[in-house]
Amino acid sequence: MNQELVNIAFGRRQLNRQMTLEQAVALLWPVISVGELAEKAIARVSGLQQQVKGHKGSDFHDRSDSKYITVTYYRNNAWACLKRLENKIGTLRVCVYEPKTKINYYLLIPPRAYRAYKNKNNSAKIWFDLDGRPRSPMRAGSRDLWRWRVTADEWAGRLKKTS
């Protein structure tokens, strides 16, 4: 991290005081890229090597790609949208954050499940009820991506999915 920019952004007085990990994270949270944080978590836990920045198609050497998305609420609908899938080549390691319940949901979505969404202007939706609970899509023919839900350990690569 660029120390000079950290000093400018937060001030020497704030940075010199003793902080708990929680306080430090709260201070830095607005400037942390959560997507990059997810990638670092997967790499640390699984031992997977990350691709060089700018590599198209995947984040890791096993061809998987990390996606961090947040649920959107609009009128009487709630969903998390998976975009920019046109260059993806392997399993999607998706972390969906639901802000009402403050719960992370984890999915390992294989290429066959998102192949229909690889058009540049298309996106896959992961649906929720208005109270923040996961739900299946209501439209006939829509893919239910909840089928690929896993535990946090499976998502990060600590355990292998058993089904």
Image (cartoon, grey):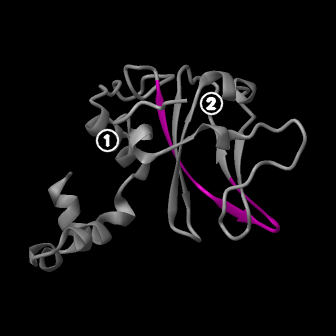
The percent coordinates of residue 95 (x first, y second) are 50, 47
**Residue 88 image-quadrant placement:** top right
Amino acid tagged 1: Lys
The answer to whether residue 76 is magenta is yes
Give the crowd class for mark 1: few <14, some 14-19, many >=20 residues within 10 Å: some
User: Which residues, given as a range, are shown in magenta?
Assistant: 64-79
Amino acid tagged 2: Leu
> Residue placed at 53% from the left, 22% from the top?
90
Q: Is residue 108 left or right of residue 28?
A: right
> Residue placed at 75% from the left, 26% from the top?
116
Q: Quadrant of the C terminus?
A: top right
The answer to whether residue 18 is magenta is no
Q: Is residue 127 left or right of residue 105?
A: right
Classify 133 as above or below 156: below
Secondary structure of the residue carrying tag 2 is loop
Q: Is residue 140 left or right of residue 40?
A: right
Identify the residue under disc 1: 40
